[in-house]
Image (cartoon, coloured by chain):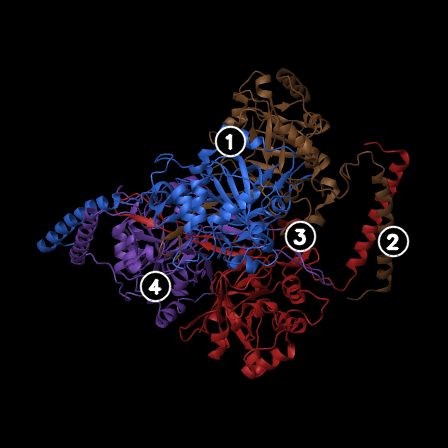
Chain colours: A brown, B blue, C purple, D red
């Protein structure tokens, strides 16, 4: 490696200019009104809106349990379920294991592989979706996205969620069993449906949107996955302003897909996860709640604590 | 394929003898008093003791929630955790996926593989452990253990569990922080500890045993996995007679390991799962409950509904 | 467990009858002319027709190399390739690993999961396919099919294959670019095509069948996997009589699928693998050989030595 | 998003400075004598030193086959084999699949997961190891390291390798059965050992280094993986200057580990793979070749064509 004197000078000047550029650029950026971080829970927070679940909130949820009825809201994980892109899910039962013993002990287990936090009914964590290189709380992916797991924002930080749940039956409000493909649910739709249901959202709630799209699950998977009705940016902002903890839906992306603004990809994911620390719960089964007009309930979900994962599988439940 | 006349006759006689043997043998077997199936919930039942969780039981559990405090009872799933035999657990974060969009959408997911229902904190389903070829309700493994998942007794049949939980702090009762390796917890130990705690077990309860063994988790994995203190057959029979739904512990097999009777392998698994349809919950963290003297609580767990799986990962919670 | 005296007697008689039945039945069975085991290489052999590859055979193959041209015969393993049943193939590149060092070391690896010996271009081992419970050399699956790998007949026993290869271009012989779906290739077809090619098969050869079906690969996967032309039982017997080592083809099962005899499933697999210890090589790309009229060559393949596996992925090569 | 006038100016100046810095910096960098790309095979090449295997080279290798003896050089893939970091390897045999048919067809397959190109005997591809963000031919990882596979430098580009192989028995040359832990093999060692063997390396050869370290494989895995003797940077440069195609060894990193220069991580990987497009073959079994004094042979290896993979498993063979 041989530097000529001239080249060395070029390098020195170049580095000096780079530093100047960085300092000035940073000043310019920090002047922006659009500073979405640090989060309202501090620069080091990794739990986002899960912080809204206080003992008082837990007791509020508990008091909604009056009948002792549980609604499982999750789908069964099985071969052939709708899957995004080239993700996969595989389960196999190996040959039985025989243990020595006069009592003839024998057992089965199962081999599972897949993008576990992002298939089937899935709960999106704060390390899942970003804006350029930045994720919740301004964390740059270069600093936390490691091969063996996220070193920040991993799903194990969320903790158990036991809180008030509210179902917003937008399909019913619009007078249909199923919203149209790519129908964008507006803030007005949410307000109207809540008014019909005579309910208000409160801070810390989990809000589930019933679009009717879920009836396509394992019935018409091609249609299910191609598009979906869902909330748009304005409706998401309405929910963020209401300070909810989780937004779920009976579709695969909670948000409308594709976005009516063709230049945008996943803007609701960015708004809720990155900017507001609010979680998404996708591919839910909200049909039974809707059928029974159960609009208010205790929502319970404990993310599977896979260290450094971006999301969690699992079936949340609604209890009345 | 050429049969001589003589050989054909041998074959005919042989088959006749075999049929006679089968008929007589069956009669002899059916005379046994030790008929552990069909189950008390009928010959077609696949849920076992989960049937004990009624709306009334759910309301009983709900009424135990008075403070709004949640204790997560599950371990974090991570590389290096104690693992049985040649099971494995792997999690990787692939390169980020970039979606087209002026809003710079980008996301991570995770690739997971492992014996998912039987690693880390795990909930044993009724298809997990058998007696010879027979599992819960007398199901012969030849009829339900299929490569793509169990066609009977799969974990997806269990459904959500929300019920009264009772912690039995056997370590405390015995005046130690941690029971000795391979200490067999007796029925008298359970009765004595319950008396100390001034509590009774009721039908449908989940009973968690605190042995103190859990403090070895990720501290001394070699010792943790080599043996463990746990309930013996008599203690398990005591719990089965009490008609519980789940028995859990802060060790890796709930039952004492190895069994003091060296000729037996996993007899408690057989007694609880196969004969009584009672589930096991292994590798729990019961230390916080024990520390706070929380002996009675709402136990909540929703098995991950992996179709045809033998068990489930996941973190149960105790709520007070 | 309480036996009445009468029941005990029933049991004794039953067992006595069972033993008699077994002894007589065995005698009848052993009288069968259709004893396909032990194998010609002895009762303990695990390599089957790979035993035919002697140093002399290797030198025979070597002498076919005159131009220094290599034809890769394997398909690329990739998402979306044709796959049997619910098998899967997944490859992901995790986030880069950075090692400390002033030289900025960094590396990538890949996470792969799938039914590795039975997807894409695949070489079927002797533990893959059986007749009832019996596999090559009469091995009963109860004795060797263990959860952590086959304890007999695993692919690691095969060893490297370097031998004379012969392409039989049946499509060309029949005057078509691609044989019809489910066309059964007969022994006469093989003889006729060999005569046209002016070639004879010799003991220890690998025989590759060109059907033209391979052009559908990644072009029309649905058609590719639904049926295929291939050899029938008689053609397979012709090849077994010729004492070949491997039979390969540019289709997914070497044999015609479905079999013209609707009551049979995989009879050629049984004939070649179980009865004759002859391997199958599926999903090959024989198009280049056919195009260049290369009918005789050195065939080289080293099965991936996955201990206890049923087959092997990998690209065999033909050298001229 | 509200910009004050002042902030906007800062931003404009900042961008201007950044562009200047980039232009100057690039000029300085390009002036370096240490430009290791584009490769000698052109800026778009993805095969590196595999380009050295010409028909003439294949015929040269073929002529080394005189006895018809094959030496398998790969290790068996099995549970418990030495593994780098948190990589894993899992193989399971699922329950048998039964197909309908009067001929009782039944089959097994296997579920495999692991970092397949980088475990056990492994062949490192050009996308495996880099210098900062740059890999072979100056490819920036941001441009080709995609989650679903490398879009450049994937192992499927290599193609079959059939060429002259040379074993350099450095252990024998140094008069030991096994080199010391972390012994750095020098260029003088290689020259000396070649002289003892009375052999010269030629362009396109595969060079295998026998260190004796391989005898620890599955005997003392802890020692095997902790360090290893291997070639240093100078020896690697000697081999690169000799224009070889692959460098292999009976250790886990070909190169000495850790490097005697503690500030360097994997410098030989960088020199061979990134700068020279020369492949590495690790965890080989060279003991049989060394025992038989087989120093010259035909080396055959066909990388498993996993699209976009960083390396390949598989057993190369040496033929004499």
Horizontal placement of A279 versus B308: left or right? right
Q: Which residue is mark 4?
A: C46
Residue at 87% from the left image edge and 49% from the top image edge = A20
Between B170 and C319, which is closer to the camera in this rendering? Answer: B170
Q: Which residue is mark 2?
A: A16
Q: Position of residue C207 (x, y in %)?
A: 34, 58
State the mark number for residue B57: 1
Q: Pointer 4 indicates a residue of which chain?
A: C
Q: Which residue is mark 3?
A: D141
- Dot 1 lies on which element? helix
Q: Are marks 1 and 4 in contact (CB under 8 Å)?
A: no
Instruction: Respond whether the residues carrying marks 1 and 3 are from the same subunit.
Output: no
Residue at 59% from the left image edge and 36% from the top image edge = A301
Q: Quadrant of residue B277?
A: top left
Rounded to the nearest angstrom, the CA distance separating label 1 from label 2 is 71 Å
Instruction: Respond whether the residues carrying marks 3 and 2 are from the same subunit.
Output: no
Q: Position of residue C2 (x, y in %)?
A: 27, 47
Q: Position of residue A221 (x, y in %)?
A: 49, 32
State which mark lies toward you, 1 or 3: 1
Instruction: Respond whether the residues carrying marks 1 and 2 are from the same subunit.
Output: no
Rounded to the nearest angstrom, the CA distance separating label 4 from label 2 is 70 Å
Between D49 and C123, which is closer to the camera in this rendering? Answer: C123
């Amino acid at each position: 490696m041989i530097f000529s004197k001239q080249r060395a000078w070029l390098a020195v000047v170049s580095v000096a200019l780079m530093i100047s550029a960085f300092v000035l650029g940073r000043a310019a950026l920090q002047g922006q009104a659009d500073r979405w971080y640090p989060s309202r829970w501090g620069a080091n927070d990794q739990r986002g809106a899960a912080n809204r679940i206080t003992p008082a909130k837990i007791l509020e949820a508990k008091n909604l349990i009056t009948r002792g009825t549980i609604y499982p809201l999750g789908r069964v994980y099985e071969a052939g379920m709708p899957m995004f892109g080239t993700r996969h899910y595989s389960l196999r039962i190996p040959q039985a294991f025989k243990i020595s013993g006069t009592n003839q002990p024998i057992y089965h287990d199962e081999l599972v592989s897949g993008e576990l936090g992002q298939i089937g009914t899935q709960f999106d964590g704060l390390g899942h979706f970003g804006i350029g290189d930045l994720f919740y709380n301004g964390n740059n992916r270069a600093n936390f996205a490691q091969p063996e797991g996220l070193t920040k924002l991993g799903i194990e930080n969320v903790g158990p969620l036991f809180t008030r749940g509210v179902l917003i039956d937008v399909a019913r409000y619009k007078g249909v069993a199923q919203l149209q493909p790519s129908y964008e649910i507006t803030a007005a739709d949410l307000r109207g449906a809540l008014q019909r249901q005579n309910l208000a959202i409160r801070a810390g709630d989990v809000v589930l949107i019933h679009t009717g799209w879920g009836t396509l699950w394992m019935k018409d998977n091609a249609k299910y996955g191609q598009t979906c009705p869902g909330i748009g940016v304005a409706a998401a902002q309405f929910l963020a302003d209401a300070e909810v903890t989780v937004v779920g839906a009976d579709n695969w992306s909670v948000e409308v897909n594709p976005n009516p603004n063709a230049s945008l990809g996943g803007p609701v994911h960015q708004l809720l996860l990155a900017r507001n620390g609010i979680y998404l719960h996708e591919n839910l089964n909200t049909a039974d709640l809707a059928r029974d007009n159960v609009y208010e309930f205790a929502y319970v979900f404990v993310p599977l604590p896979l260290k450094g994962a971006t999301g969690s599988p699992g079936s949340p439940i609604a209890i009345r």
